Image (spheres, helix red, strand yellow):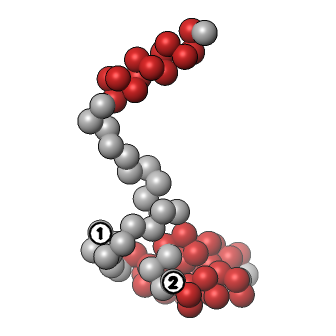
């Protein structure tokens, strides 16, 4: 938990560190603090000035998905 707290001190917008800290706190029985950590982390969600590469990793450019799927199909047949 010390390292998660340090990560949040270095980057208060690091949602991955906040989620990890929240899980660790919950496992030690500190449920209210775990919830508070999550509330702080999620409050500015969607309004952050910069991306958190460990949080929004599912975001991608899907405009060329047909070409990407075709390439994957071709590679899978080799």
Q: Answer yes or no: do the residues labelled 1 and 2 have beta carbons within 8 Å?
A: no
Label placed on residue 11: 2
**Quadrant housing the N terminus:** bottom right
Q: Nearer the viewer, mark 1 or mark 2?
A: 2
Question: CA gap, disc 1 to disc 2?
Answer: 17 Å
> Would residue 26 be visible to someone looking at this image?
no
Dot 1: element: loop
From what the image shows, is residue 39 above or below residue 15? below
**Quadrant housing the C terminus:** top right
Dot 2: element: loop
Nearer to the camera, 31 or 3: 3
- Residue 74 picture location, percent across and down: 49, 13
From what the image shows, is residue 52 above or below residue 31? above
Residue at horizontal 54 percent and vertical 77 percent from the top: 18
For marks 1 and 2, the one nearer the N-term is: 2
From what the image shows, is residue 1 above or below residue 52? below
- Residue 38 picture location, percent across and down: 48, 78
Furthest residue in direction top, as rendered: 77
Residue at horizontal 56 percent and vertical 87 percent from the top: 10
Q: Which image quadrant is residue 75 in?
A: top right
Counting other residues with Cα less than 10 Å from the Cα at mark 1, is it few (<14), some (14-19), or many (20 or more)?
few
Residue annotated with mark 1: 46
- Residue 33 picture location, percent across and down: 56, 88
Residue at horizontal 26 percent and vertical 36 percent from the top: 63
Q: Which image quadrant is residue 19 in?
A: bottom right
Residue at horizontal 64 percent and vertical 88 percent from the top: 6
> Would residue 58 be visible to someone looking at this image?
yes
């Amino acid at each position: 938990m010390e390292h998660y707290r340090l990560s949040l001190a270095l980057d208060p917008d690091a949602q991955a560190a906040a989620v990890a800290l929240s899980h660790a706190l919950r496992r030690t029985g500190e449920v209210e603090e775990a919830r508070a950590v999550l509330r702080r982390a999620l409050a500015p969600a969607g309004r952050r000035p910069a991306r958190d590469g460990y949080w929004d990793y599912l975001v991608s450019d899907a405009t060329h998905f047909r070409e990407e799927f075709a390439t994957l199909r071709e590679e899978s047949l080799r």
